[in-house]
Image (cartoon, helix red, strand yellow):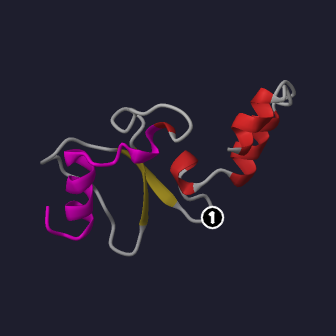
Amino acid sequence: LYPLASRAAGEDAAGLVEVLRERWGGIGYDGVQAVQATPSPLRSRGSAYQLTPGGYTNVDGTEIIATGGPPAGAHNDIHRLEVGWLVLAAAGLG
C-alpha cells in the first residue's frame, strides 16, 4: 500500500514509486535478481517449459495474470489453468 499512499500524497512526482519498486519490489514485480535466472513467459496449458533442474526461471505472467481492482490488483488472479500447468511442469509432471 506504500506506493498507493505515496501517490495519494503527491509524493510520487519525483519517481519515488519507481525507485521503491526497483529497490524493494517483490519477486512478483520483476523476478529474482540475486541469481542468474532465465526469463520465460507464462505459457498456455500443455506448452513446454525449458526449466533447468537446480536453476532459476523468472516466469512473467503479466499477460495472463491481469484481472483485479484496487487495492490488491491482480494478486488474487492466480487461479488459472496456466499457473497450474506451470506448477505441474516444475514438478516434472507436465
> Percent x, y for residue 6?
79, 35
Coordinates of residue 34 in the picture (x, y in percent): 63, 64
Residue 67 lies, in percent from the top left, at 38, 32
- At horizontal 67% and vertical 44% (from top left) the residue drawn is 1
Q: Is 12 above or below relative to 84?
A: above
Seen in the image, is 81 located left or right of residue 61?
left
Q: Is residue 88 magenta?
A: yes
Which quarter of the rendered picture does the C terminus lie within? bottom left
- Place residue 57 in its image quadrant: bottom left
* Magenta stretch contains residue 61: no
Q: Is residue 92 left or right of residue 53?
A: left
Q: At 60% from the left edge and 54% from the top edge, which residue is drawn?
A: 26
Numbered range of the magenta stretch: 74-94
23, 80: nearer the viewer: 80
Can you identify the residue that label 1 sits on? Answer: 34
x, y percent for residue 50: 28, 56
Q: State the predominant SS element of the stretch in magenta.
A: helix
Q: Residue at x 56, y 46 (%)?
A: 29
Front residue of this view, candidates 50 and 71: 71
